[in-house]
Image (spheres, coloured by chain):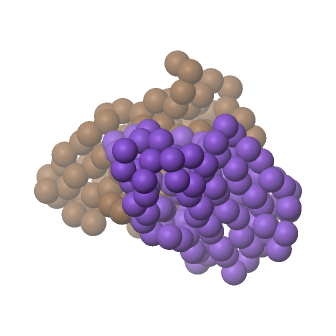
Chain colours: A purple, B brown
């Protein structure tokens, strides 16, 4: 089935540093979503992207929908300890008519104070 | 409530036992999804409802898995004759439109012993 390649798998950074992670696919997606998941909780939506080339910010978070519609990236600026968690990209394939999301395998972020 | 609610939060089942997992979506949300999340992995799609109609069940791993949403609101995911490989977190998500971003519940962690 369709898969998303998310990288890096994990990151360990110093508080205040910027972070970048990305997702790529071999097929075209109509929507890209970025979620954060804390231990024992469900994924929480951070940013939604609907158009190729779209750049959207949510506080210190910025995400972009790749022009080819096969990739997306998420940047976190000036990281703080509460940014710790697992970040997932998720895409809605062009071929889908049911809203079925395809998820990446996640990027685990650890922030050292 | 304001968000997607799932119960129970944790379930331990003996192998061979039947289990039922409940999801209360956000009021008025037409679309409802079930996902399965194995440890260290991203969520994987199980099934999709639009109101009471189950329009996509392509992700259900076997005929032991059954989902229903009889009145177009609350949904139940039932697993018959549970096996150890069924151990995972089961996430429910809802959205106002099948093309819109999905909001997740906290999940039910199922452990089959």
Residue at the (59%, 28%) spot, across then down: B26
Q: Quadrant of residue B72?
A: top right
Farthest-out residue, bottom? A26
Residue B76 coordinates in the image, percent (x, y): 44, 40
In the rendered structure, the answer to whether residue B70 lies left or right of residue A97 reads: left
Q: How many marks?
A: 0
In the rendered structure, the answer to whether residue A107 lies left or right of residue A65 reads: left
Whether residue A52 appears in this view of the structure is: yes
In the rendered structure, the answer to whether residue B46 lies left or right of residue A31 reads: left
Q: In terms of depth relative to the viewer, which is nearer, A58 or A113? A: A113
Q: In terms of depth relative to the viewer, which is nearer, B40 or B76? A: B40
Looking at the rendered image, the quarter that the C terminus of chain B falls into is bottom left
Q: In terms of depth relative to the viewer, which is nearer, A26 or B5? A: A26
Residue at the (48%, 58%) spot, across then down: B43
Whether residue B59 appears in this view of the structure is: no
Residue at the (37%, 44%) spot, across then down: A113
Would you place residue A25 above or below residue B94 in this image?
below
Residue at the (24%, 42%) spot, across then down: B11
Q: In terms of depth relative to the viewer, which is nearer, B62 or B97? A: B97
Residue A76 coordinates in the image, percent (x, y): 60, 51
Residue B23 coordinates in the image, percent (x, y): 46, 35
Would you place residue A18 above or below residue B58 in this image?
above
In the rendered structure, the answer to whether residue A29 lies left or right of residue A43 reads: right
């Amino acid at each position: 089935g369709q898969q998303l390649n998310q990288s890096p798998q994990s990151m360990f950074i110093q508080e205040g540093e910027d972070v970048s992670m990305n997702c790529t696919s071999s097929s075209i997606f109509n929507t890209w979503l970025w979620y954060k998941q804390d231990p024992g909780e469900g994924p929480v939506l951070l940013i939604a992207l609907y158009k190729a080339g779209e750049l959207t910010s949510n506080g210190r978070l910025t995400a972009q929908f790749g022009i080819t519609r096969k990739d997306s990236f998420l940047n976190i600026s000036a990281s703080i300890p509460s940014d710790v968690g697992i970040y997932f990209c998720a895409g809605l394939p062009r071929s889908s008519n049911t809203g079925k999301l395809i998820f990446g395998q996640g990027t685990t972020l650890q922030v050292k104070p | 409530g304001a968000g997607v609610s799932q119960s129970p939060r944790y379930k331990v089942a003996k192998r061979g036992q039947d289990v039922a997992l409940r999801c209360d979506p956000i009021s008025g949300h037409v679309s409802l999804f079930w996902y399965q999340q194995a440890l260290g992995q991203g969520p994987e799609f199980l099934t999709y409802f639009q109101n009471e109609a189950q329009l996509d069940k392509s992700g259900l791993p076997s005929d032991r898995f059954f989902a229903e949403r009889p009145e177009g609101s609350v949904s139940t995911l039932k697993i018959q004759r549970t096996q150890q490989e069924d151990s995972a977190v089961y996430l429910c998500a809802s959205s106002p439109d099948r093309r819109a971003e999905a909001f997740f519940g906290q999940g039910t962690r199922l452990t089959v012993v």
